Image (spheres, rainbow, N blue to C red):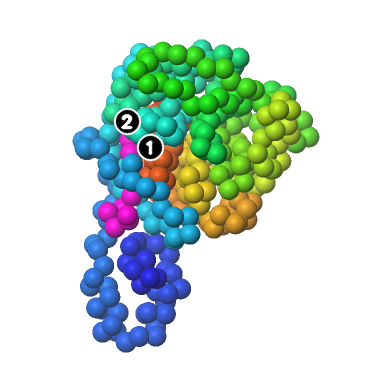
């Protein structure tokens, strides 16, 4: 099995099994193995914005891989699959795939909008506007989905703090709205107020739900490139209304410029095996066994994966099956980009 995996991505770091093949078996055997490998995937376009919109990617609706199987890592170059032209959506700051409706995405605007979320098709068409009762919109920055016991809940993170002066931040949770045949509706949310350790204040734009632990996770947006990772240490205590966060990791985001220094969105795959964090110019991924805590995983080197060229990318979300991801930039008339799995993945 390791021989096949080694063929999948020749650009990846060599696996142990690959080393054994190179040095234990004779060259003829190695040559016959490599001859059966697919060609190396093409490098991403220098201008991803020039890509034509492909047909729908069937991988979006494919069954999720068994968590016990080794994940197939690697994504195709992101391609345009739609365009959001609704005048209501002009500053998308969070995106997540629906748990109830195939091909539907949930998103919200950044600060300045009303407390509401939007359902759009993968092609960018506005399907429904949902007002969130019991919520305030100070600086909404990301949206996540909790899939537990057959019920899907959306979480919206009012976690932005450009001035780093807020004594607390707020998360709003509500069941995924029923939008069957509706263009507008409303839902009531419950609120959880979170505080950082020692009364600190941070600007953050990245929120996710961790399936194995049930924890809510937040990654800060630090201008110095050093982002802190916080979580609730298990399922959030919604009934209490207020809870302190715990720092679990520190990751260095900065690579080669300011646009790659800021963590602007995140998501965790439905299996809990992968975490993606995006900046304005790239996407990073960490993988793990679900028994591993993220505090151990995030100290390991990340994998920088293909990213679209966007004006101000502040949203990212896995496919519902975890086999690809989608992004959308802030601004009017922005394109929806999808990066499906490499052709050799299921």
From what the image shows, is residue 65 above or below residue 3?
A: above
Which residue is under mark 2? 122
Q: Which mark is residue 296?
A: none
Is residue 171 something that shows in the picture? yes
Looking at the picture, tell me which residue is in the foreground, 54 or 101.
101
In the image: residue 204, left or right of residue 343: right
Residue 261 position in % (x across, y down): 52, 40
| Residue at x 77%, y 30% (from the top left corner) | 199
Q: Earlier in the sequence, mark 1 or mark 2?
A: 2
Q: How many marks?
A: 2
Looking at the picture, tell me which residue is in the foreground, 70 or 10.
70
Image quarter hosting the C terminus:
bottom left
Which residue is under mark 1? 326
Is residue 302 something that shows in the picture? no
| Residue at x 46%, y 73% (from the top left corner) | 16
Image quarter hosting the N terminus:
bottom left
Q: Does residue 338 show up magenta in the picture?
A: yes
Query: Magenta stretch?
Result: 334-346
**Neighbour tally class for label 2: few under 14, some 14-19, many 20 plus, Cα within 10 Å:** many
Which secondary structure, mark 2?
A: loop
């Amino acid at each position: 099995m390791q021989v096949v995996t080694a063929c999948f991505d020749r650009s990846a770091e060599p696996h142990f099994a690959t080393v054994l093949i190179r040095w234990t078996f004779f060259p003829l055997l190695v040559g016959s193995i490599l001859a059966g490998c697919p060609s190396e995937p093409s490098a991403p376009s220098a201008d991803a914005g020039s890509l034509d919109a492909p047909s729908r990617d069937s991988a979006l609706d494919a069954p999720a891989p068994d968590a016990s199987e080794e994940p197939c890592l690697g994504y195709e170059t992101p391609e345009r699959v739609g365009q959001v032209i609704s005048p209501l959506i002009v500053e998308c700051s969070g995106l997540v795939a629906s748990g109830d409706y195939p091909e539907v995405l949930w998103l919200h605007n950044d600060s300045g909008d009303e407390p509401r979320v939007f359902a759009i098709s993968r092609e960018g068409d506005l399907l429904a506007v949902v007002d969130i009762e019991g919520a305030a919109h100070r600086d909404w920055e990301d949206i996540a989905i909790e899939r537990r016991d057959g019920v899907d809940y959306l979480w919206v993170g009012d976690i932005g703090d450009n001035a780093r002066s807020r004594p607390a931040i707020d998360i709003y949770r509500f069941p995924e709205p029923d939008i069957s045949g509706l263009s507008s509706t409303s839902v009531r949310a419950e609120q959880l107020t979170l505080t950082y350790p020692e009364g600190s204040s941070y600007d953050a734009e990245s929120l996710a739900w961790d399936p194995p632990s049930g924890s809510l996770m937040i990654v800060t947006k630090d201008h110095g490139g050093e982002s802190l990772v916080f979580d609730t240490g298990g399922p959030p205590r919604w009934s209490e209304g207020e809870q302190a966060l715990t720092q679990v990791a520190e990751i260095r985001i900065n690579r080669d410029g300011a646009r790659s220094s800021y963590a602007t969105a995140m998501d965790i795959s439905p299996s809990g095996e992968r975490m993606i964090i995006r900046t304005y110019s790239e996407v990073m991924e960490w993988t793990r066994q679900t028994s591993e805590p993220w505090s151990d995983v995030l100290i390991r080197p990340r994998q920088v994966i293909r990213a679209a060229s966007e004006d101000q990318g502040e949203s990212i979300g896995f496919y519902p099956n975890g086999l690809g991801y989608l992004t959308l930039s802030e601004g009017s008339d922005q394109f929806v980009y999808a990066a499906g799995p490499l052709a050799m993945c299921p």
